[in-house]
Amino acid sequence: MPVLEKTITINAPVEKVFNFLIKPENWKDIYPKITEIRNIQSLPNGGYRFSYRFNMFAGMRCEVDTENTDVAVNKRISYKNTCGIKGKKPVELDETISFSPEDGKTKLTYKAENKVTVPVIGVLIEKLLMRMNERMVKTCLTNLKGKME
């Protein structure tokens, strides 16, 4: 199972960065490919369950169902995502965003693991998706840094 990990330092306090990222409606501000966020429900752990759509390429839309599986205020947000196209969701993506304060700044670490449940070609799809995710994460982290600083 491929793993993606990226770290960035943001010149803003942990509380500001965490409070922005925990709210699903803010994601459109840092990930321009999101076209719709819907069905936002608060969870007892302080997180959310929601769905969103984004444009992949060549007009293909990906549908994602997301749930915060772990929330530690100002420390960590974990997500369980199921992703797919046209109602079929063969991709699972587990993500964790960790926050560490550093002299009034935030060291943010993003970590994700993909699992594709398509027999035989799943491994190839996992690698392709991880490359796509890497570009998406780089864009989101750059946009987040710009928004927070």
Image (cartoon, rainbow, N blue to C red):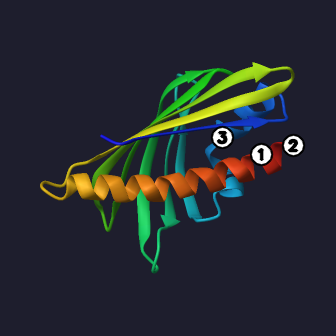
**Residue highlighted by disc 2:** 149
Q: Position of residue 97 (x, y in %)?
A: 58, 32
Front residue of 15 and 41: 15
Q: Position of residue 98 (x, y in %)?
A: 60, 27
Residue count near mark 1 (Cα–Cα under 10 Å), binned few <14, some 14–19, many ≥20: some
Q: Position of residue 19 (x, y in %)?
A: 73, 33
Q: Which residue does the image show at 75% across and 35% down from the upper left?
A: 9
Q: Position of residue 105 (x, y in %)?
A: 82, 28
Q: Quadrant of the N terminus?
A: top left
Q: Which mark is residue 145?
A: 1
**Residue highlighted by disc 3:** 23
Query: Badges 2 and 1: C-beta atoms under 8 Å apart?
Result: yes
Give the distance between the C-alpha atoms of the residues marked 2 and 3, in whole angstroms: 18 Å
Which residue lies most toward the left here? 120
**Residue 60 picture quarter:** bottom left
Give the distance between the C-alpha atoms of the residues marked 2 and 1, in whole angstroms: 6 Å
Residue count near mark 2 (Cα–Cα under 10 Å), binned few <14, some 14–19, many ≥20: few
Front residue of 58 and 69: 58
Q: Which residue does the image show at 44% across and 56% down from the upper left?
A: 131
Amino acid type shown at disc 2: Glu
Residue count near mark 3 (Cα–Cα under 10 Å), binned few <14, some 14–19, many ≥20: few
Query: Badges 3 and 1: C-beta atoms under 8 Å apart?
Result: no
Q: Secondary structure at mark 2?
A: loop
Front residue of 42 and 114: 114
Q: Which mark is residue 76?
A: none
Give the distance between the C-alpha atoms of the residues marked 3 and 1, in whole angstroms: 16 Å
